[in-house]
């Protein structure tokens, strides 16, 4: 069965399983993605989240190891530069990265056995695209500060249970890719990476297997191009 494909501006979006679609795509310059963490979000509810956690990728350890991690590893291997949100509990299960950075949110982490986590770790693979371009390393840090989605109000209107603020992906797209390069997100969700790419002049390849989130992503990315 051919996946559904939508072309929106410089973005090409695929509805389907990334493990089947990735081998058919052109080689991207960078992979920037936020895979499911496999830590059992289902049913978890706070005043900042909705209770619609019916993931197609089940939120459990076995499914993370059998489906999500192989797909993420495939994506990492297909580009010279990759930046992956990994979650704290699954960090050690990914292929060894070249570097580790992340985003610090004083109000934006879950509780752990050691207290409230305030770091969204990011695994970096390859090297800075600015080094490869001959422009030198980008003058920025591998760690960013963000006050949290409920402070900025970015969650409003986004039905995905675990969305990342657009500011996260703006920062990461600028860090891990150059203007006019192609960025792949094999776990597109509600399309935040694609929104950042549209704003920042990158070509975007996005894959999502849940039709509801795919539709949200199409509309969000189209809205940026309409502006």
Image (spheres, rainbow, N blue to C red):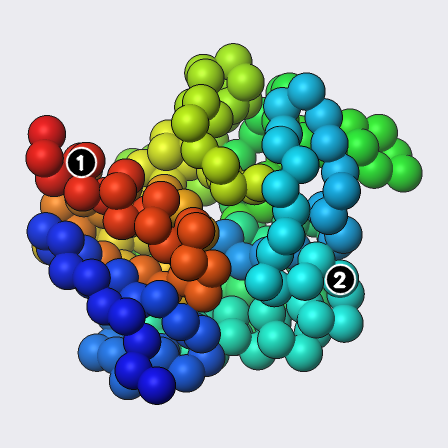
Quarter of the image for the N terminus: give it: bottom left
Crowd rating for badge 2 (residues with CA inside 10 Å; few <14, some 14–19, many 20+):
some
Q: Residue sitting at 45 percent across and 65 percent down?
A: 209
Between the C-alphas of marks 2 and 1, the distance is: 34 Å
Residue 10 drawn at (x, y percent): 12, 55
Q: Which residue is mark 2?
A: 60
Residue 59 image-quadrant placement: bottom right
SS for dot 1: helix
The residue nearer to you, when weighing 215 against 173, is 215
Q: Is residue 83 above or below residue 107?
A: below
Q: Extreme right residue here?
A: 113
Q: Residue sitting at 80 percent across and 32 percent down?
A: 111
The residue nearer to you, when weighing 20 against 85, is 20
Residue 119 drawn at (x, y percent): 63, 35
SS for dot 2: loop
Q: Residue sitting at 27 percent across and 49 percent down?
A: 218
Q: Is residue 215 left or right of residue 66?
A: left
The residue nearer to you, when weighing 183 against 139, is 183
Q: Which residue is mark 1?
A: 224
Residue 127 drawn at (x, y percent): 36, 61
Crowd rating for badge 1 (residues with CA inside 10 Å; few <14, some 14–19, many 20+):
some
Which of the two discs, 2 and 1, labels the residue nearer the N terminus? Answer: 2
Residue 141 image-quadrant placement: top left
């Amino acid at each position: 069965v051919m996946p559904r494909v939508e072309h929106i501006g410089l973005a090409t979006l695929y509805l389907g399983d990334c493990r089947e679609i990735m081998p058919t795509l052109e080689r991207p310059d960078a992979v920037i993605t936020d895979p499911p963490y496999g830590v059992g979000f289902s049913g978890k509810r706070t005043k900042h989240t909705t209770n619609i956690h019916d993931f197609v990728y089940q939120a459990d350890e076995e499914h993370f190891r059998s489906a999500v991690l192989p797909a993420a590893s495939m994506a990492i291997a297909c580009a010279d530069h990759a930046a992956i949100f990994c979650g704290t509990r699954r960090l050690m299960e990914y292929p060894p990265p070249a570097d580790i950075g992340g985003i610090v949110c004083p109000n934006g982490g879950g509780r752990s056995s050691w207290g409230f986590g305030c770091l969204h770790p990011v695994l970096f693979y390859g090297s800075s695209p600015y080094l490869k371009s001959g422009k030198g390393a980008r003058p920025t840090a591998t760690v960013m500060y963000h006050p949290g989605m409920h402070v900025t109000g970015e969650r409003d209107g986004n039905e995905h249970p675990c969305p990342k603020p657009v500011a996260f992906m703006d920062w990461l797209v600028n860090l891990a890719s150059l203007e006019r390069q192609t960025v792949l997100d094999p776990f597109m969700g509600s399309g935040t990476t694609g929104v950042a790419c549209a704003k920042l002049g990158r070509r975007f390849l996005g894959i999502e297997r849940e039709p509801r989130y795919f539709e949200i992503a199409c509309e969000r990315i189209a809205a940026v191009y309409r502006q």
